[in-house]
Amino acid sequence: MVKFLAAVLALLLIGLPAYGEPTTPITYNAGTTATRFTGPAFDTCTAPTLAQMTAWKASPYKAIAIYFGGVNRTCAQSQLTPAWVTSVTAMGWRLVPVYLGLQAPCGTRKYKMSTASSNRDAVRDADDAVAKAKALGLLPGSALYNDMENYDRTNTVCRSAVLHYLSAWTKELHAQRYVSGVYVNQASGAPDLAAAYNSSSYARPDALWIARWDGNSALTGWPPVPNTFWAVGQRGKQYRGDHTETYGGVTLNIDNDRFDAPVASVAYRYTVRTTIHSYSGPSTAYPVRSTIAAGAAVRLVCQTFGPKIGTTTVWDKLIDGTYVTDYYVRTPNKTGYSAPLPGCSFPFQTTINGLSRRYGPGTAYATYPSTLPIGSLAWVTCQAPGSKVGTTAVWDRLTDRSWVTDYYVATGSNTSYTAPIRRC
């Protein structure tokens, strides 16, 4: 709690907007990104071996949930090391980090939160989750999912404790520069979080992952959750429970999942082909920050666009927040982005309902047919000047190439640009 209060005080002192529940502030580190995964995934209690993960590249799954911490985690995790994370993400796997911490006072798990101090319990769990995530190499900007198992939602005291706990989890993760995810049962946590979606008493998590074993992988049409809640890259569903599947001659016991949601971000190691400079932004027009010798290793976190060098307009962001042209880095693609590197983006919740998406940075540009519901994620790639809305002339370019005014996005400022978002 002390860390959270200090972070809030720091935001107030530098003049950032005083967001409160349900939309709480989040900032990001310079050398990081958020990663959005869309597609089929699986989770299994114990992280598989590298050989098993290699064999399962033949499966339809492209992401795996990893149980990386929490007092109620029961399965041994001898494989789950920084080296394992580096190896499986280099294979192309996305990771969904799951933290099985203190559970509802009316739940069935052994270790439970206190009804009197669920906020403090959540802050301790969030701090522990961040420490364990960092130890594995999961960067700030990663989504960390709190696993809140089923509980008796008719117990009002218990329900209140859970909501306060998940709210404090979200605020502390935001203060620590991580994205907040929550895994809940469709019969308890899902309807309770949906009922509190616009409540000024609770911070809204950035992503919702529900367990509903109905065999339907759809990310809409959930009975307890309106389609306008957690609507833009913010949903996961566990739609089938324990069973075995076999790929590449390897059998695992898994649950089935589908995601369109933030997941873990990591650094990827490559080498450079010749001596190059890194720049403070994605262009040679920015100041030079360092010189990198031919053959040296670099750690990349994401890719973005900039002036063309050689055959490509792709620029790579390094873990120190500087940029190099992709043309001289030994990534696979020399004309476009290279998997598994994600595109650089930062998600922030929107603060009004029906936020217009436009074809350019200003109200004179035509609007897209669909708008952004309140609390949806604006996946921001860069910022540019445009027509003034409210107190700001800053506009945000999203990953789908649409534009929204920054005034209704919970970035760091309602008057100016927000670091570390690049300029368009």
Image: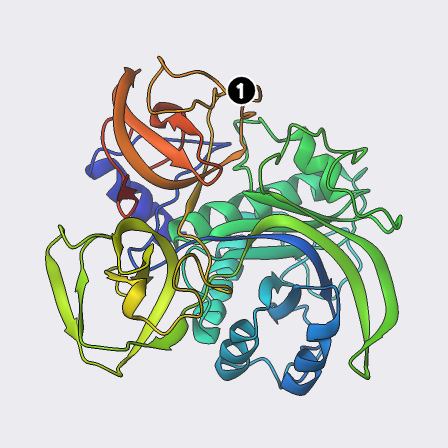
Q: Residue shown at 56%/75% (left/top)?
A: 91
Quick check: 244 left or right of 347?
right
Q: Residue 368 location, x and y as percent? A: 52, 21
Total marks drawn?
1
Q: Is residue 125 above or below residue 190?
A: below
Q: Is residue 333 above or below residue 222?
A: below
Quick check: 54 left or right of 126?
right
Q: Is residue 321 above or below residue 382?
A: below
Q: Residue shown at 58%/80% (left/top)?
A: 80
Q: Is residue 76 visible?
A: no
Q: Is residue 10 visible?
A: yes
Question: Camera-side residue: 81 or 291?
Answer: 291
Q: For the residue labelled by badge 1, is the local secondary structure a helix, a strand or a loop? A: loop
Q: Residue shown at 67%/77% (left/top)?
A: 47
The residue where tag 1 is placed is 353
The C terminus appears in which quarter of the rendering?
top left
Q: Residue 402 location, x and y as percent? A: 45, 30
